[in-house]
Amino acid sequence: MEKLKIWVKNMEKKDIRKLVAAKRKTLSQTEVETKSRIICEQIMKMEAFQKASCIFVYMGCKGEVSTEPLIEEAWRLGKKVAAPRVCGEDMNYYYITSYEDTAPGYFDIPEPVAGTAEAADEEALLIVPGVGFDQQRHRCGYGKGFYDRYLSQHQKHTTLAAAFEFQMMEEVPADVHDIFPQYLITEERFFADSNVLLESIGQAAKETEPQLRKLSTAAKNQALLKAAEYLEQYRGKILDANAQDIQKARENQMPEGLVDRLLLNDSRIEGMSEGLRQIARLDDPVGEIMEMKKRPNGLMIGKKRVPLGVVGIIYESRPNVTADAFGLCFKTGNAVILKGGSDAIHSNRAIVDVLCHALQDCGIPSAALQLIGVTDRETTARFMKLKQYVDVLIPRGGAGLIRAVVEGSTIPVIETGTGNCHIYVDETADLEMAADIINNAKTQRIGVCNACESIVVHEKIEKVFLSVLKQKLDAHNVELRCDKQALSCIDGGVPASEEDWGREYLDYILSVKTVSSIEEAIAHINRYNTGHSEAIITKDYANAMRFLNEIDAAAVYVNASTRFTDGFEFGFGAEIGISTQKLHARGPMGLEALTTTKYIIFGNGQTR
């Protein structure tokens, strides 16, 4: 059902009520039940529900979101349940232990019967009904003000509104006395007061961290294997969610390279699963003792690898990062908080749901892995300042995202850079091999940071080489943006601008720079590269060694594609990112990069 469109600014609430009432009449009972169950299941996964000892909940009727699944789960878990009863101008809550404790009351809405105990004014999760909502969580109720009056007098509750997606509007007029909920959930989206949400997520991660530190390697590996199994078992759910993201991306005319980053298929889900299995097979670095030395006074001093604690990851439209990040952080005993982009929100939610299911089935708190389900910039900015809970922040994405995190975070950041990767074709290169390597590095997958974006070619072999290369690249319609000399060597080239030398295209575009020596090639690459991955194709050993020594990058290749800069290819199982900074970690970051060390000292009574 389409979202209700509000085309009149400051539309009257009475008109909103009429429109929503008409929409509700078009819903079948099956639609109400199906959508309601989706909403209730999302609420059940929330920390606010799991921690609450009491749930204050409305009794749904007349096309509202049905709260029956929530009520029944609360009873099953031994939580107290309270429902509202209207008396004159007031509304109060009363405990119910079964549906037999209710009977039709105000407007035939089920209410607790006389004789049920009035609920105490306690901290509880309170589920709020409503007619219409907007993304700021402004609420249009039924017009009697019962909930606004009640909540103004009872402020201990965590408040959450449940609504169908068609109840979401562009704008709901807000009155001075209106109290809007802290959370709002539909069958498709989640909205929240970002301060409340982040505080809850941060606290849950910090509370879970000590439990993760105590997990044995065997327990961690068992959970990773279960997670890998569930990714494949529930691939249909994940692919359905990804299809929603892909459809929206194409409607928004997202560039093809970015759509490719977003896309999941059977092969990529199997790759995610295999990544988790490989992580399970890797040695656990946590607990490793290093550099144990005996001092002259008899003290034994060494270093021990320990988890970082709580890791935050901000990333864009790469849903496979969700599984990779979980696997690496979990294996190293870290809790992880993920903040993905809006482009992949449905995919990320589905993957996190599956992974958390695996954790719970292994007896491990699901708060070990949390996804911030709100994608607005304000929430992202506040997340970057959650220093009291998050120990390190890792951004993965384009230059704009990484710059925003590095400049805006108060949490220590491990910077992962963009990939303006070069391949230098030396005058002694095997030209056929060079063309094959560049073809692979450019076209195998264009939307990744280790794809080749620029080639540097020695002038002595340029004319012959570009002819060989162009035949291969033409099959993929690659556009060559060339300097003046390269333009004279081929047909169909496009003049390059200064901007092209430093650009990460993420598209079927390649810049071509002509040089007269290896010195000029190295100088050009070091000026324009992003510190990611650079390669030389050569038969000259001295030139190869010089390139390895003088190029400033995280990964430097001789006679191989830059596409190998990847945690899986390097034998890490997966990667948390590719660091282009020089402190703590550099290059593909596997397990050890997600640990730190502490000193351990053994003595036998020494004093100073």
Image (tube, rainbow, N blue to C red):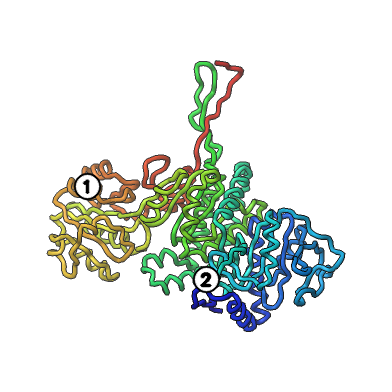
Residue 411 lies, with reference to residue 258, above or below; the image says: above
Left or right: 422 with respect to 355? left
Q: Label 2, secondary structure: give it.
A: loop
Residue 224 visible in the displayed image: no
Q: Quadrant of residue 551?
A: top left
Q: Position of residue 409 (x, y in %)?
A: 44, 47
Query: At numbered mark 1, what does the secondary structure look like: helix, strand or loop?
Result: helix
Three-letter amino acid code of the residue under disc 1:
Ile
Residue 398, quarter of picture: bottom left
Q: Residue furthest right?
A: 115
How far apart in space, not on screen, are marks 2 and 1 (Cα)?
A: 56 Å
Tell me the quadrant of the picture where the N terminus can be found.
bottom right
At 72% from the left and 68% from the top, the residue drawn is: 58
108 vs 593, left or right, is right
* Residue 155 seen in this snapshot: yes
Q: Residue at x 32, y 65 (%)?
A: 507
> x%, y% of residue 317?
44, 62
Instruction: For marks 2 and 1, give the one nearer the viewer.
Output: 2
User: What kind of residue is marked 2?
Assistant: Glu
Residue 550 or 370: which is nearer the viewer? 370
Foreground: 216 or 608? Answer: 608
Q: Which mark is residue 26?
A: none
Residue plotted at (28% across, 59% down): 438
Residue 120 location, quadrant: bottom right
What residue is disc 2 on?
171
Q: Is residue 126 above or below residue 538?
A: below
Q: Which residue is mark 1?
A: 522
